[in-house]
Amino acid sequence: MPGAVTFEASPDTRARRMTLALAIYTGVTLLLIACASRETWLVHTRYNHFALLAEAWLKGRLDLGGPPPEYAGGNDFASYGGRWFVVFPPFPSVLLLPLVALAGGAAHVPDGLFFLLLAGLAPALLFLALEKLRRRVESRRSELENVILACLFCVGSVYFFCSLQGTVWYAAHVVGAVLMAGYLLFALGAERPLLAGACLALGFATRTPLLLAAPLFVLEAVRETGIAAPRGAPLIARYDARRLLKLLGWFALPIALGLAFSLWHNAARFDSAFEPGYRYLSIAWAHRIAKWGLFDYHYLAKNLGVALTSLPWLPAGDGPVQVNAHGLALWITTPMYLWLVVARRWTALSRELLLCVALVALPTLFYQNTGWVQFGYRFSNDYAPLLFLLLAIVGPPLRGGFMVAAALAVVVNFFGALTFGRPEHARFYVIEPTQKVLYQPD
């Protein structure tokens, strides 16, 4: 009809994409603020390890300068050489450093609010990456579909409940997801090698497994530098070697610097460049780390069980539905992932993304901890942005059964966001301190 305007008819400009990304950030942030507990605004979290580490830096120390504060209950601090350390990768502390300095100490910084306000960047950046797929004709999604997928990443996955926690473990997932989404945006088409490498280096300094997504940029660079060559030409003649080496060099530079800093940081704290300090944690299950190590095949079955088969508990008598603190299976919290299992239209890029999903997921599947305590399998935040790009490329149209699954995911994750970690809703969660109970007892 003359004069009719559709969503797709609008000009596809950078300004429009940035406006929509800003709208997604704003909408997500307002939603998270509405769902957050009152304490988020007023006080620091109980486990504000990143703020404590920033405070130690401001005092010129790598250790805390004394025992951890009593309110933290000694939870996940390392003791070595008579000193106490925060062993989690430190980049989130860098982000908090100015706030801690201005506030005069970690105890005066509402760290949970800071990470909540940061959380909306991940779906916003993911939208820009999805739009880049559309512009490169790697995806058939419309602009509106990309908006929906970006929003579903937040409210239809375990990213939702993690964004509201603010404590050290979940804060790292928020920062890691932002950096992974940024990495995807810059790595697609090998377009921004230095920025892609910087995002991945900082991702490694936030969530160590993120570094294993590096093959995406490498493979994209190889694809982008391919040139026409006679049949039977040597492999090297099929690529613009000079351009390829330049792309890989700029990409590798920040990663090499990040790895060098990490090795120095380890050696300065624990007298070994390859010792991150986790085995010095004062935790109840330190014995299993001493026996099996941080990563071992011994943990694989348990982690697969949680990630793939953990269901809500239906009490035999009266009472509410309950969630084991090991968390719900991925297909319960985000059933849209099931469509990736039956996808048939695989492209070169989708195979690259799938490879990176497998590589990033692998360390946590062999890790000594399932992610306990959690509403859903929180380690999936490391590779969820990759999975949503896969859904854009090989997933079904956003209608019918897929949208029913998406609606269920939103309902499930709203429940988790509004109940997890809140004392008034503790009846919905089963926290068994030995961590040995995975499934509902008989």
Image (cartoon, rainbow, N blue to C red):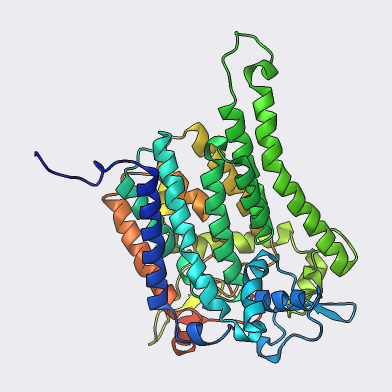
Q: Is residue 328 visible in the rendered structure shown here?
A: no
State the image coordinates of residue 319 (x, y, percent, origin top left): 39, 86
Q: 121 left or right of 20?
A: right
Quadrant in which the N terminus is drawn: top left
Where on the picture, by quarter, is residue 171? bottom right
- Residue at horizontal 51 percent and vertical 87 percent from the top: 42
Q: 17 left or right of 44?
A: left
- Residue at horizontal 45 percent and vertical 89 percent from the top: 424
- Residue at horizontal 39 percent and vertical 65 percent from the top: 26
State the image coordinates of residue 395 (x, y, percent, origin top left): 39, 44
Q: Name above or below for residue 333 compared with residue 358.
A: below
State the image coordinates of residue 126 (x, y, percent, origin top left): 46, 52
- Residue at horizontal 67 percent and vertical 41 percent from the top: 251
Q: Name above or below for residue 140 compared with residue 93.
A: above
Q: Nearer the viewer, residue 393 or 412?
A: 393
Q: 297 left or right of 441?
A: right
Where on the picture, by quarter, is residue 71? bottom right
Q: Nearer the viewer, residue 369 or 60?
A: 60
Where on the picture, by quarter, is residue 397? top left
Q: Name above or below for residue 80 compared with residue 337.
A: below
Extreme residue in the left direction:
1
Q: Is residue 3 visible in the rendered structure shown here?
A: yes
State the image coordinates of residue 312 (x, y, percent, origin top left): 45, 72
